[in-house]
Amino acid sequence: DGGITQSPKYLFRKEGQNVTLSCEQNLNHDAMYWYRQDPGQGLRLIYYSQIVNDFQKGDIAEGYSVSREKKESFPLTVTSAQKNPTAFYLCASSIGQGYSNQPQHFGDGTRLSIL
Amino acid sequence: QQQVKQSPQSLIVQKGGISIINCAYENTAFDYFPWYQQFPGKGPALLIAIRPDVSEKKEGRFTISFNKSAKQFSLHIMDSQPGDSATYFCAASIYSQTGANNLFFGTGTRLTVIP
């Protein structure tokens, strides 16, 4: 069954701690995305990657970092520099460059809270 | 700056009624307009999508109406059911052969269908 797997479902962060959210896809998609969702604000783009070993900042990249070493994986690290990390984090993927009308397919999210 | 503006923020409809959610955009280069449905604790799932060369697309009880001159599009849910209670997001993207094809999301509408 193809899809996007995010883990863990719930995560708690202590002050000054970095935490990493996992995102794995088996859809053979080139492009992957990370969004942050806060109540009443929709989805805001944190980082995106169009291809392995390449990624770009989205609208709210400060305090976050990513890597894209494998096509299937796009982990997100929430660093201690992110002062308001409590949110629902969503990972998505799409086919990639050169294709029009691409839907994005989403995982079921990770809810991050501060201890 | 919100690229896609969505209204209303919340909507309550009686079972069997019609739910209507509206979105507006400014960038005439947008060429793909999907709608996503999100249940609590889950990621958004693609519901229906339209391209600007058609004025209406229907899939079951869900219809997108598109008004290119007004730069508006809307989702109509006919015969609304309690199971349709969810948050709905409109989105828009621009095709680019070399670019990211990123989606710009509206802020969401929380629909509640009363039995």
Image (cartoon, coloured by chain):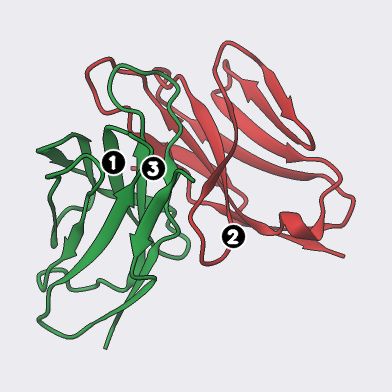
Chain colours: A green, B red
- Residue that mark 1 sits on: A32
CA distance separating discs 1 and 2: 22 Å
Front: mark 3 or 2: 2
Residue B89 image point, x, y percent: 54, 46
Are discs 3 and 2 less than 8 Å apart at CB?
Answer: no
CA distance separating discs 1 and 3: 22 Å
Relative to the observer, which residue lies in front, A62 or B45? Answer: B45
- Do discs 3 and 2 belong to a common subunit? yes
CA distance separating discs 3 and 2: 23 Å
From the viewer's perspective, is A54 left or right of A96?
Answer: left
In which image quadrant can residue B82 be found? bottom right
Residue A80 image point, x, y percent: 11, 74
Relative to the observer, which residue lies in front, A62 or A103? Answer: A103
Question: Subunit of mark 1?
Answer: A
In which image quadrant can residue B84 be found? bottom right
Question: Subunit of mark 2?
Answer: B
- Residue that mark 2 sits on: B39
Residue B17 image point, x, y percent: 87, 49
Work out whether B85 lies above or below A58: below
Are discs 1 and 3 less than 8 Å apart at CB?
Answer: no
Q: Amino acid at mark 2?
A: Phe
Could you say whether the residue bearing mark 2 is in a helix, strand or loop? loop
Other-residue count near label 3 (Cα within 10 Å), few / some / many at <14 / 14–19 / ≥20: few
Could you say whether the residue bearing mark 1 is in a helix, strand or loop? strand
Could you say whether the residue bearing mark 3 is in a helix, strand or loop? loop
First in residue order: circle 3 vs circle 2: 3
Question: Subunit of mark 3?
Answer: B
- Do discs 1 and 3 belong to a common subunit? no
Q: Amino acid at mark 3?
A: Gln
Residue lying at 53% horizontally and 33% vertically, measured from the top left: B34
Q: Amino acid at mark 1?
A: Met
Q: Which mark is residue B2?
A: 3
